[in-house]
Image (cartoon, helix red, strand yellow):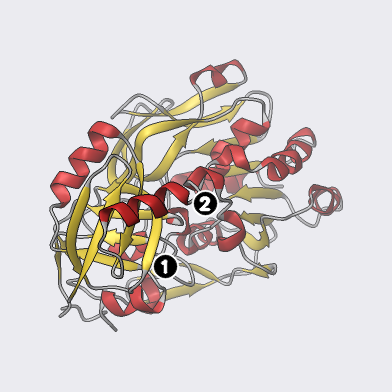
Amino acid sequence: MQKVWVYIENGTYLEAESFGATGTSVGEIVFNTSLTGYQEIITDPSYAGQFITFTMPEIGNVGVNKNDMESSKAHCKGVFVRNYHHEYSSFRGENDLASLLKENNVLGICNIDTRYLTKMIRDEGAMMMIASTEISSKDELAKILKDSPRIEDINYIKEVTTKEPYVHKYGAWDHQKMAYKKAMMSDKKVIAIDFGIKRNILNELVEAGLEVEVVPASFKAEDLIARYEAGEIGGIFLSNGPGDPLTLTQEKAQLQKLIDKNIPIFAICLGHQMLSIAHGYDTYKLKFGQHGGNHPVANSDTKIVEITAQNHNYNVPDNIVEIADITHINLFDNTIEGVKYKNKPIFSVQHHPEASPGPHESKYIFSEFAKIVK
């Protein structure tokens, strides 16, 4: 392994070892508390522009495989792990994690104290950083970081969205056949707007009995409204995605047109935030975000606590209660996790209810959407 040098905007300067791609990369550092699913996390487009610090100390031990890809590639800037395992042990493993990172130009940083990094982020918040296998000078790294755009200044949606529309052809994972189910024909069709969508979200929409057509984030509201009024589609889904939702002004304007037509809409994560903004309630940035597969969320209707998967740095404001009913609350920090807009067929959640690889306690939400699709 070769050396890699890390400089964080609070002045922290570290040396570690590299197991991924080589080069120099700038991004925002966050931590993820999931115990499993590192491949799904790394290939989640919502992490575009970020370095992921895994609190799970052993990473790489089950390798990677084509079926656990949440998108076509790894979109994050890099990963921090305590111990990297190049030799993997899993009957589903097809390659090692380092190969995936190198193929997608993602830095892999290991033999570093991830507990120290996690506590630092917890205390000081998510920060910009730079990592390099080429540059060891602290001063030079600090200058490059200072001269680089911050994550909130970059529209990563353009990088992760689909370039052309397509119909999603798979359902949920079949554990007996060890393959994804083929999509069945449905009389309910929805449009999924791709801000950086995860494959298993699409799978669960199909599993709920919907035909799903995915379109780019550069959609035109007039086209979708015409298709809805013609009876061609019965609803719209807004996906997860990376970056600061307040920068997406064009998308906001298009969403406002859809909202005005009372089209059934369901949204997750970034889509959830975009709906709030389009209604006139701007989001705010959390100190260090919520990233992991162990977040307890209370369902306001059933009073049941669901363990959920999370991946976001931004949240909808508390005063959204003026126009929406709160359906879910995060029990870690009491932030809003889900809303249903008053007198509208529109609802959204902050967490990822498909939760691949788990937990699966919130999958019912996809069926709730299918019920209101015309």
> Which residue shows up at 86% across the image and 51% down it?
226
- Compared to residue 271, the image places residue 321 above or below, namely above
Does residue 21 appear in the picture of this structure?
yes
Question: 76 or 220, which lies in front?
Answer: 76
Question: 217 or 354, which lies in front?
Answer: 217
How many residues crowd mark 1 within 10 Å: few (<14), some (14–19), many (20+)? Answer: many
For label 2, the residue is 241
Q: Position of residue 227 (x, y in %)?
A: 82, 54
> Which mark is first along the chain, 2 or 1?
1
- In-image side of 147 versus 160 (left or right): left
Q: Amino acid at mark 2?
A: Gly
Q: Position of residue 109 (x, y in %)?
A: 23, 64
Q: Secondary structure at mark 1?
A: loop
Mark seen at residue 74: 1
User: In the picture, residue 62 is in which quadrant?
Assistant: bottom left
Q: Position of residue 3 (x, y in %)?
A: 19, 69
